[in-house]
Image (cartoon, rainbow, N blue to C red):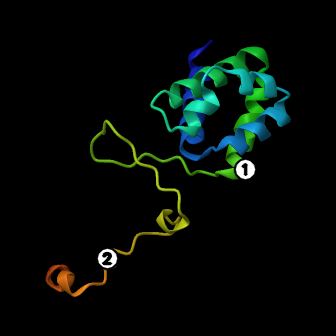
Amino acid sequence: MDKALGNRIIALRQRIVANFNQGHWEEIGLLTGLSELITKYPRLLRSLYWNDEDYAGNVLGVLRRVAEEDPRALRAVEKYVEERFPGESEYVSAKPADRTITFAPHVFRVPDTGVEADLVAVMMPLRTEFDRVYKAIRLACKARA
């Protein structure tokens, strides 16, 4: 396997791990004719279901097998991922972390629009015991403005 193909597979794995559920894998199987490879690959769907640490490795293994068996099928997987999860794979961090947290609810999606430098959002419980915390945040924002 050449380096360029390896890089494509690794990038694809990242997006799949961040977004896929069992239904997506079943659709990929139907689109590529590789349903048996997906359902019989050791631990792929089980590790997805249980959110096991080896899921990313299993995804990598399946994608490698897909590329080896049918390069056109790999392109179909790439197209499927791009259509359903366009440009959603972006790593933004000041330093690498041992653990990655992926937020699935739409409320946590990062918008494509520019950043408003003077906008602050606070998410916290609405209880009087947090009034001092909120006031401190508000004062800090006013001091920064």
Residue drawn at (79%, 32%) of the image: 29
Label 2: which residue? Answer: 122
Say which quadrant the N terminus sits in: top right
**In the image, is 89 to the left or to the right of 20?**
left
Q: Position of residue 98 (x, y in %)?
A: 31, 36
Q: Position of residue 48 (x, y in %)?
A: 57, 36
Residue drawn at (63%, 20%) of the image: 42
In terms of depth relative to the viewer, which is nearer, 98 or 130? 130
Q: Secondary structure at mark 1?
A: helix
Label 1: which residue? Answer: 83
**In the image, is 126 to the left or to the right of 88?**
left
Residue at the far top in the pictured view: 1
Dot 2: within a 10 Å radius of its alpha carbon, few (fewer than 14), some, or many (20 or more) residues? few
In terms of depth relative to the viewer, which is nearer, 71 or 65? 65
Dot 1: within a 10 Å radius of its alpha carbon, few (fewer than 14), some, or many (20 or more) residues? few
**In the image, is 98 to the left or to the right of 102?**
left
Q: Looking at the picture, does residue 115 appear above or below residue 83?
A: below
Q: Earlier in the sequence, mark 1 or mark 2?
A: 1
Q: Secondary structure at mark 2?
A: loop
Amino acid carrying label 2: it is: Val
Residue drawn at (32%, 74%) of the image: 117
Compute the Cα span from label 1 to label 2: 33 Å
Q: Quadrant of residue 118?
A: bottom left
Q: Quadrant of residue 20?
A: top right
Q: Nearer the viewer, mark 1 or mark 2?
A: 2
Amino acid carrying label 1: it is: Glu
Q: Quadrant of residue 81?
A: top right
Q: Looking at the picture, does residue 13 appear above or below residue 92?
A: above
**Tag 1 near tag 2, CB within 8 Å:** no
